[in-house]
């Protein structure tokens, strides 16, 4: 069994802005531990001869030309938002600065 | 600035520069400054579900140009998601590079002959721009923030220096040289006032020889001057704190330009936990040798080489001349100096005119190189006094045209060598005693005659030309 603790799950939930009940914390601690156990299983394989793979596709350097394409209509964009003002998205006041 | 005896500051800088691409990093929205809010947005840069990022080829080329200019190794790299919640990131993560940046381990040589290592220069996307309302109640007294996503997804390169900087002046030199290099690569316009180049400073202090102290990160440094002042203030604050028995907390501090102080913005209670993981929507980046070569071939000379080329024209340069040459290089106006030199003209005068008169204007497009060279030549021949030459240049800068015609229109041309000679001859005749004493070796009387000529010509004569006339007749 993985050594994942309830406190770690609570921490991850906080970072993800998820409010979990005590029951949910217990449940997810067990479930997440099982997922980590599965990863640990794979880590136990001897892969010394396998080249490290960063991506399932063999593709590299997928790029596009630096050419401007039309943007969306602002009215259409702001209509999707719960609130807007002065052509901008309005959100609850941000406490503090960006990380 | 001096810290108390035995103390040393340790500074590393993180510089973000926006890239001058036509479009954003991962979508085709235009990368422009100052557009109407939220008019350069699409599903990708708004983080709408189902949208997929595609990397901008030119952003990669520009990042490599920056890496090459900083002597970095260009390496295969990957993209990660840096997860955090903040309304200026509509996806709730920023695409950045983490353990494998495109450029690693380089250096930048400064004009004071020191070298600062570059740890990395990686690609990432910019965030949107938020405006905070409320508190002061400016609009409706509302307690909310407004967000414009035009900047969201604009390509950035973040350049991280090693903790090699030991004074606020060195930090300023580093930032200034880096800015010049970024402009020279064509990747950045280096405009700090528009936020296209932004600097964060990591500052700590230690007693010489001790291990590094706890560092604070300073934000809101909007000019090179702010950078220097903020670092000085912060290092002095930390030394005073420690000497009073206190302990420096690791935190982010905000520089207040008006107060000249830093203050706590955010305490780092726990290690930042951005839960970086591989961006599954992007594949690896591994620019081929051919691509790297194309970028290298397209690069012009860097500021250090260009500075050396101008200094070589001067031979022995004074401190003031070196400063003037720095200005010339920063503005990319050395073509005027080189053209003057090629025409056999007066290089120090050309440098002074570029560093002062040309530097004072935003737009030199109306001034042709030929007109500039001709003006400097007229000044050197004594056809124009220094003041008149500056007036002619000002006219050339604002309207263009021919310097001889401008000088004529302003009545400057009457002081040709002939007319000056006539004036000098007349004054010698009118002041025979003074002339005799001058001929007998009393050099002080040269100034007497210069004064008379200036009065007669209402200050339009060139002092050096007058003395040449006097000496020719001595």
Image (cartoon, coloured by chain):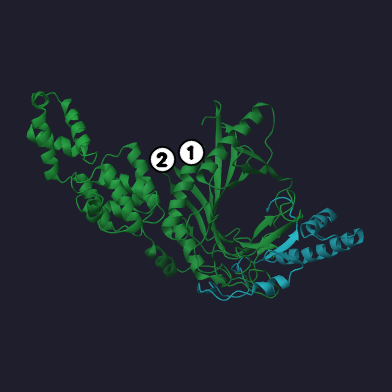
Please name whichever residue, B244 or B163, is drawn nearer the observer in this view of the structure: B244
Tags 1 and 2 both on a single chain = yes
Q: Which picture quadrant has residue B323? A: top left
Please name whichever residue, B42 or B71, is drawn nearer the observer in this view of the structure: B42
Q: Secondary structure at mark 1?
A: helix
How would you rate the neighbour count of disc 1 (Cα within 10 Å): few for under 14, some for 14-19, many for 20 or more? some
Q: Which chain is cyan?
A: A
In the rendered structure, are the residues bearing label 1 and label 2 in contact, judged by CB atoms less than 8 Å apart?
yes
Q: Which residue is the site of mark 1?
A: B169
Percent coordinates x, y for residue B461 in the rendering: 21, 40
Give the residue displayed 59% in from the left and 68% down from the top.
A51
Which of the chains bears the disc numbered 2?
B
What's the distance in space between the residues labelled 1 and 2, CA to CA?
Answer: 10 Å
Q: Secondary structure at mark 2?
A: loop
How would you rate the neighbour count of disc 2 (Cα within 10 Å): few for under 14, some for 14-19, many for 20 or more? few
Numbered label attached to residue B272: none
- Horizontal relation, residue A73 to residue B3: left or right: right
Residue B352 seen in the current view: yes
The tint chain B carries is green
Percent coordinates x, y for residue A67 in the rendering: 51, 74
Q: Which residue is the site of mark 2?
A: B112
- Horizontal relation, residue B468 to residue A97: left or right: left
Give the residue displayed 11% in from the left and 45% down from the top.
B418
Quadrant housing the C terminus of chain B: top left
The residue mark sitting in front, 1 or 2, is 1
Which of the chains bears the disc numbered 1?
B
Please name whichever residue, B357 or A50, is drawn nearer the observer in this view of the structure: B357
Percent coordinates x, y for residue B87 in the rendering: 71, 60
What is the residue that sits farthest to the right in this orientation? Answer: A23
Q: Which picture quadrant has residue B125? A: bottom right
Give the residue displayed 54% in from the left and 72% down from the top.
A60
């Amino acid at each position: 069994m993985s050594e994942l603790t309830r406190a770690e799950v609570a921490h991850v939930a906080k970072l993800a802005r998820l409010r979990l009940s005590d029951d949910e914390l217990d449940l997810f601690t067990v479930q997440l531990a099982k997922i980590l156990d599965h990863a640990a299983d794979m880590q136990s394989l001897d892969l010394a001869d396998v080249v490290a793979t960063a991506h399932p596709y063999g593709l590299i350097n997928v790029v596009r030309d630096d050419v401007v394409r039309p943007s969306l209509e602002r009215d259409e964009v702001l209509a999707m938002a719960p609130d807007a003002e002065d052509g901008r998205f309005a959100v609850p006041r941000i406490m503090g600065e960006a990380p | 600035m001096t810290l108390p005896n035995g103390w040393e500051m340790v500074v590393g800088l993180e510089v973000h520069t926006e890239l001058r691409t036509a479009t954003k990093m991962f979508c085709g929205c235009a990368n422009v400054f100052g557009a109407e809010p939220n008019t350069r947005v699409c599903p990708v840069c708004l983080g709408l579900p189902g949208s997929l990022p595609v990397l901008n080829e030119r952003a990669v080329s520009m990042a490599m140009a920056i890496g090459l200019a900083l002597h970095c190794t260009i390496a295969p790299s990957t993209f990660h998601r840096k997860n955090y919640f903040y309304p200026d990131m509509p996806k709730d993560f920023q695409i950045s590079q983490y353990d494998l940046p495109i450029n690693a381990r380089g250096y930048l040589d400064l004009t004071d002959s020191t070298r600062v290592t570059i740890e990395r220069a990686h690609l990432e996307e910019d965030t949107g721009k938020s405006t905070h309302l409320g508190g002061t109640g400016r609009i409706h007294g509302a307690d909310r923030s407004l967000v414009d996503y035009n900047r969201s997804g604009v390509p950035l390169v973040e350049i991280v220096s090693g903790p090699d900087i030991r004074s606020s002046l060195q930090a300023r030199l580093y930032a200034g040289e880096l800015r010049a290099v970024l402009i020279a690569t064509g990747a950045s316009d280096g405009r700090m006032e528009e936020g296209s180049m932004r600097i964060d400073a990591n500052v700590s202090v230690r007693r010489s020889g001790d291990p590094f102290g706890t560092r604070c990160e300073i934000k809101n440094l909007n000019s090179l001057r702010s950078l220097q002042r903020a670092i000085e203030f912060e290092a002095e604050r930390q030394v005073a704190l420690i000497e009073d028995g206190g302990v420096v907390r690791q935190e982010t501090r905000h520089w207040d330009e008006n107060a000249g102080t830093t203050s706590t913005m955010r305490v780092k209670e726990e290690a930042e936990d951005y839960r970086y993981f591989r961006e599954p929507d992007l594949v690896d980046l591994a620019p081929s040798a051919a691509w790297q070569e194309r970028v290298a071939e397209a690069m012009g000379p860097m500021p250090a080489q260009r500075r050396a080329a101008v200094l070589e024209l001067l031979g022995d340069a004074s401190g003031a001349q070196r400063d003037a040459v720095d200005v010339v290089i920063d503005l990319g106006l050395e073509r005027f100096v080189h053209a003057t030199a090629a025409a056999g003209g007066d290089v120090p005068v050309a440098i002074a005119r570029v560093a002062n008169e040309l530097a004072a204007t935003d737009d030199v497009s109306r001034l042709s190189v030929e007109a500039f060279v001709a003006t400097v030549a007229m000044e050197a021949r004594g056809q124009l006094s220094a003041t008149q030459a500056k007036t002619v240049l000002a006219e050339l800068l604002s309207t263009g045209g021919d310097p001889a015609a401008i000088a004529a229109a302003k009545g400057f041309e009457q002081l040709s060598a002939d007319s000056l000679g006539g004036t000098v001859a007349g004054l010698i005749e009118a002041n025979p005693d003074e002339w005799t004493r001058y001929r007998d070796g009393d050099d002080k009387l040269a100034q007497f005659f210069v004064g008379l000529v200036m009065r007669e010509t209402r200050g339009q004569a060139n002092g050096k030309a007058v003395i040449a006339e006097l000496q020719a007749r001595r």
